[in-house]
Image: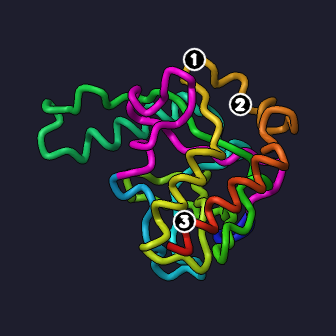
Amino acid sequence: MADGDHAAHGDCWFRFIIDSRWITEDEILSEQALKRGSIGEANGRPWNHEVSGRLNSMTADVQADGEAFVAAIVSGLQNPQKRPKHLCFAGVAFNSPKNLATQIGNIRTGVFHTPIDLPDRFASPAHADFVTFGSSDHDLDAIRTWLQENLKVLKAAQLSKMPSVCSSSQSVTVETSSAASTAQSMTDVLRR
């Protein structure tokens, strides 16, 4: 797979959850998980915004990669001894690229392979972005809401379930009425 290619619909796109508080008691993604610059502007790409993640099919060990990701964050801190108390590899937020490729109002979404090369401390050949076309900074809250409603969560101890969950239409397919209602609510938010 080359840089910029669409991710396969049957794959599993995931994003590391690096704070245990970002998984609610009901095991859904908290609002805080998609704040603090998690949706960035795309530079030099045909899309407008992106959320970093990875493709499960290209990741040998999600647990090890998650722990290495946290270690890379710590290594970039000015004072690693003052590591934030809740910083840890807590799990993943995920869904299939097929379920993430949609139209939200006037915003088109998808998942694209965007590998990161060394010497970047976050280098990964499995890197992929959830992307938006036609979005502006005014749309970010609506995009966050849509992702929070559509990403599934697995805690670190549940990672062995991820491959079967992404291939199971029962576990990841958004109910038609829910999807329609979400699309309508997103359209309403985008119109404001």
Q: Quadrant of the N terminus?
A: bottom right
Distance (Cα) linking label 2 and label 3: 31 Å
Image coords of residue 47 (percent x, y): 58, 77
Q: Residue at x 12, y 39 (%)?
A: 79
Q: Which mark is residue 162?
A: 2
**Do the CB atoms of the residues marked 3 and 1 lie less than 8 Å apart?**
no
Q: Residues within 10 Å of mark 1 (few under 14, many from 20)?
A: few
Q: How is the image coloured?
A: rainbow
Q: Residues within 10 Å of mark 2 (few under 14, many from 20)?
A: many
Viewed as shown, does residue 34 lie left or right of 147?
Answer: left
Give SS at disc 2. helix
- Looking at the picture, tell me which residue is in the foreground, 116 or 167: 167
Tell me the residue at 63%/20% (across/down).
158
The dot on residue 174 is none
Query: Would you say 157 lies left or right of 150 here?
Result: left
Q: Which residue is mark 3?
A: 189
Which residue shows up at 44% across the image and 43% down it?
Answer: 31
- Magenta residues span 7-35
> Which one is earlier in the sequence, the residue at label 3 or at label 1?
1
Q: Amino acid at mark 1?
A: Ala
**What is the x, y in percent for residue 54?**
60, 49
Where residue 77 sits in the image (x, y, percent)?
20, 44
| SS at circle 3 | helix
Amino acid type of disc 3? Val
Q: Helix or strand or loop: what does disc 1 sit on?
A: helix
**Magenta span has 33?**
yes
Q: Amino acid at mark 2?
A: Met
